[in-house]
Amino acid sequence: MTRRTLGALALGVALLAGLAFVLIQVVRPGDPVSTEVIQDGLDHPWDIAFAADGRMLVTERTGRVLVFAS
């Protein structure tokens, strides 16, 4: 393996370990988990951001940007 490959592998392992630590701290086995649909009918939602006025901005993988009022 090249030095670059080993570095990328080490970084990936470190990131996964960090994620596992966070998940263990946030979600404990046996804790109830619930979901709530905020907006349906989206085509591969990619990212969500909130504007200062409360509107929700959603990007889709296709490149569309959707704006939803609060």
Image (cartoon, rainbow, N blue to C red):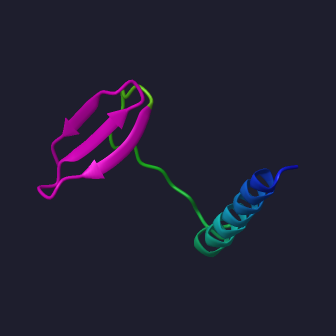
- Rendered view: 3 above or below 27: above
In the picture as drawn, the residue positioned furthest to the bottom comes out as 25
Instruction: Give residue 17's position: percent from left, percent from top.
Output: 72, 67
Instruction: Give residue 22's position: percent from left, percent from top.
Output: 61, 71
- Rendered view: 49 above or below 63: below
Q: How many marks?
A: 0
Instruction: Give residue 20's position: percent from left, percent from top.
Output: 69, 66
- Rendered view: 37 above or below 25: above
Q: Is residue 53 magenta?
A: yes
The image quadrant of residue 7 is bottom right
In the picture as drawn, the residue positioned furthest to the front comes out as 3
Q: Is residue 58 magenta?
A: yes
- Give whichever of 3, 30 is nearer the camera: 3
Instruction: Give residue 16's position: percent from left, percent from top.
Output: 70, 61
Q: Residue at x 17, y 48 (%)?
A: 55
Q: Residue at x 70, y 61 (%)?
A: 11
Left or right: where does residue 48 sit relative to residue 1? left
In the picture as drawn, the residue positioned furthest to the right comes out as 1
Residue range in magenta is 45-70
- Rendered view: 42 above or below 58: above
Q: Residue at x 24, y 33 (%)?
A: 66
The image quadrant of residue 19 is bottom right
- Give whichever of 46, 35 is nearer the camera: 46
- Give whichever of 19, 11 is nearer the camera: 11
Q: Residue at x 47, y 50 (%)?
A: 35
Left or right: where does residue 51 sit relative to residue 45? left
